[in-house]
Amino acid sequence: MKQEEKEPDSSQSSPPSPTESCPPAAEPAITVQVDWRHPNVCAPVECSGEHSSPAVKHGDHLDYHVGHAHHHRHGDHCDLHGCC
Ligand SMILES: [Zn+2]
Ligand SMILES: [Zn+2]
Ligand SMILES: [Zn+2]
Ligand SMILES: [Zn+2]
């Protein structure tokens, strides 16, 4: 006597795919105001050119974090726009 085992018919239900709309990381999360500690001036500073991201929003422009310094690309040099 044969006993046939019936496999449970598992209905394939597609799992809900997470459709999270991730906004592009264009806007830096850090925003600093222009003040005496973070002046918006032309103060050329030595820079290796390696700017890590994310950048820092500084007033109406973007600065870069280089160590604890805020660098602002200005022509062929970098301006020092304060420190953390
Ligand atoms: Zn400059
Ligand atoms: Zn720089
Ligand atoms: Zn700046
Ligand atoms: Zn900073």
Image (cartoon, rainbow, N blue to C red):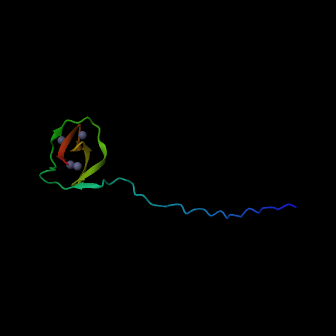
Above or below: residue 77 compared with residue 33: above
Q: Residue furthest front?
A: 1
**Camera-side residue of 62 and 8:** 8
Residue found 39% across the figure and 54% down from its top = 24
Quarter of the image with the N terminus in it: bottom right
**At which x and y percent is residue 82?**
17, 47
Above or below: residue 51 compared with residue 25: above
Residue found 13% across the figure and 50% down from its top = 37
**Camera-side residue of 67 and 25:** 67
Q: Residue furthest right?
A: 1
**At which x and y percent is residue 9?**
71, 64
Give the mark count: 0
Which image quarter: residue 21? Answer: bottom left
**At which x and y percent is residue 53?**
32, 46
Residue found 25% across the figure and 45% down from its top = 65
**Camera-side residue of 15 and 42:** 15
The answer to whether 42 appears left or right of 31 in the picture is: left
Residue found 22% across the figure and 44% down from its top = 68
**At which x and y percent is residue 43?**
15, 42
